[in-house]
Image (cartoon, rainbow, N blue to C red):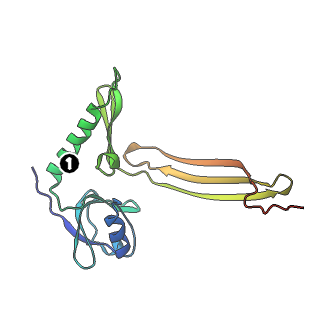
Amino acid sequence: MSQHKQIRCVVGPETVRMLNLGHPWVIADRHTSRWPQFKNGSLIELVSEQGVSLGTGVYDADSRIVARRLSSQKIEFDPWLISRLEQAKVSRNRLDFGDTTVGRLVNAEGDGIPGLTVDRYNDYLMVNDYQLEDYGITFGLGLPVKSIRSSLNLSFTYGTRGTTDYNLVKENYGIVTFNVTLHDLWFRKRRFD
């Protein structure tokens, strides 16, 4: 088993609060912008401004989620990963997939391994350990229709998703949404003669 040196990275009070609530992600902010630059996938020790250890995370400079906390403890990565993969295998063994040779073997945060999915397709495994970037903007309009006490809503979203890195696909997309909101009369004071 290899020993990985963990770099101490200070996070702000809001991130400390979210980590203490069990949220695994560290979102880029003014505190993370002060972190030294190191290789994506590096193990880091997350610490509060007071120097209290908050656990071990994986660094990703290319994402708005600059780190994903793997554990609230300082860990050795190899035994930790082997343990999580074994737990994921036990979880899948409890399921009856029948004769299928296709399925998800590891489901990221659901199996306690943030950012990692492993899918089986017959004799092949597809391992994904990256986050697809997705940027978009939405414009919308709501029009009240007094005669039926409702509103008609129309919106348009335009965005781009993916990357061409690693021979992956990048796509632009547009989504048009139309819906009707039916309003009801609640808490209306009744009038009696």
Depth check: give the residue in front, 114 or 165: 114
At x 62% / y 58%, what residue is drawn?
Answer: 138
Q: Secondary structure at mark 1?
A: helix
Q: Estimate the x, y position of residue 122 in percent, counting from the top left.
A: 32, 25
Residue sitting at the far right: 193
At x 28% / y 68%, what residue is drawn?
Answer: 37
Residue sitting at the far bottom: 50
In the visual, does 153 lie left or right of 72? right
Depth check: give the residue in front, 85 or 170: 85
At x 66% / y 59%, what residue is drawn?
Answer: 139
Q: Estimate the x, y position of residue 43 in percent, counting from the top left.
A: 22, 60
Depth check: give the residue in front, 148 or 100: 148
> Where on the picture, by quarter, is residue 25?
bottom left
Count of marks placed on residues: 1
Depth check: give the residue in front, 115 or 189: 189
Question: Where is the C terminus found, in terms of image quarters?
Answer: bottom right
Crowding at dot 1, Cα within 10 Å, few <14 / some 14-19 / many 20+, comes out as some
Q: With respect to residue 111, does 28 lie above or below?
A: below
Three-letter code, disc 1: Leu
In the visual, does 41 lie left or right of 25? left
Q: Give the residue pinned by disc 1.
A: 81
> Where on the picture, by quarter, is residue 120?
top left
Q: Estimate the x, y position of residue 8 in percent, counting from the top left.
A: 21, 70
Q: Estimate the x, y position of residue 68 in percent, counting from the top left.
A: 32, 58
In the visual, does 172 lie left or right of 193? left
In the visual, does 9 lie left or right of 149? left
At x 28% / y 32%, what residue is drawn?
Answer: 94
Residue sitting at the far front: 193
